[in-house]
Amino acid sequence: MSTPATATATATSDGAINKDHNGTGQMDHAADGRNVTTERRQNYGGNPLAHINTGESARFPAFGGEFQPGLYRPTTERKFANPAPLGLSAFALTTFVLSLINVGARGLAAPNIVVSLAFGYGGFVQLLAGMWEMAVGNTFGATALSSYGGFWISVAIILTPGGFEIVDTYTSDTSGPNDFNNAFGIFLIGWWVFTTILLACTLRSTVAFFLLFFFLDLAFLFLAIGHLLSKDGAVNTPCIKTGGYFGIFAALVAWYNAFAGIADDGNSFFVVPVAHFPWSVKGRERRAKTAHEVV
């Protein structure tokens, strides 16, 4: 038999699942209908990234701002802040700059300026964010951010002029004119496969979360095709530009998810929507609630 205190805790936990929020909500409702907004804010000390965990059974729906594609249990006592916005921002800025070069913005063609970003921000900082995601128990976030941090470091190594002589090896007298583009295309195909795996894990999350990996997946695919279809040492420009545009879209959506993870009613005049898919856990809960109200 449950004590009144136990019953209240269980009801509160279950109520947290049904909250309509984008991961930064500040309001919870106890079993007796009492508004406990003030109490929760005091418990979290005004932390703008706080998520309310009201019991052991509490689960929150997918949220790109936390880099969580499925139901997850927030760690209210964690000693780390939410590392997802940092990793998303590092990924977004580095991707944005290289993608603009890929589409030929301002007549630019050489990607050398990206080397500094790829080593420092998109590489090292994003890798740190991935390690911190591991520390807070987010397997998906740790896998994605750490991997893409490694991706940008590897790209920086390839593009470093003279430092590692990777490009020079493929452009020597004994190499064919398309050897480097073919090798780099295979390199990008591998990342397309990896991104497709991550994309499959976001199909029950939110529209903003899904679109990030959808656009990134297409960017890798078209960039890979652009290099594999090279002729006489020149890449396929239409495919490279198409991949660049999809990269820009991916960067913008990454920033959107990062903003969703930072902003709430404590530091912003508005909280951005994340739009749960109708077939997601949150979407099914909303449909069930609507059907119950109609009946």
Image: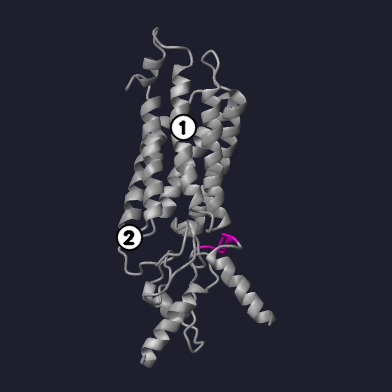
Please determine whether, in this image, residue 123 is positioned above or below residue 66: above
User: On the picture, is 36 further left or further right than 222?
Assistant: left
* Residue span colored magenta: 268-277
Q: Nearer the viewer, mark 2 or mark 1?
A: 1
Q: Quadrant of residue 115?
A: top left
Q: Residue at x 61, y 74 (%)?
A: 288
Residue 217: percent from left, percent from top: 53, 41
| Res. 105 in view | no
Disc 1: which residue: 188
Element type where label 1 sits in the image:
helix
Extreme residue toward the top, this view? 173
* Dot 1 alpha-carbon crowd within 10 angstroms: few under 14, some 14 to 19, many 20 or more: many
**274 within the magenta span:** yes
Verify whether residue 90 appears in magenta: no
Our reading of the magenta stretch's main secondary structure is: loop
Which residue is at 46% across, 46% downward? 197
Residue at x 60% of width, y 71% of height: 286
As drawn, the label of residue 80 is 2
Residue 162, above or below 23: above
Task: Report the disc number at residue 116.
Answer: none
Left or right, residue 166 beside residue 236: left
Amino acid type, label 2? Phe
The furthest residue to the right: 294
The amino acid on which the numbered mark 1 sits, given as a three-letter code, is Leu
The residue shown at (48%, 16%) is: 178
What separation in Å lies between label 2 and label 1 (alpha carbons)?
33 Å
**Where, quadrant-wise, is the N terminus in this rendering?**
bottom left
Q: Secondary structure at mark 2?
A: loop
The one of 51 and 4 positioned closer to us in this rendering: 4
| Picture coordinates of residue 76, whole percent (x, y) | 36, 69
- Marked residue nearer the N-terminal end (2 or 1): 2
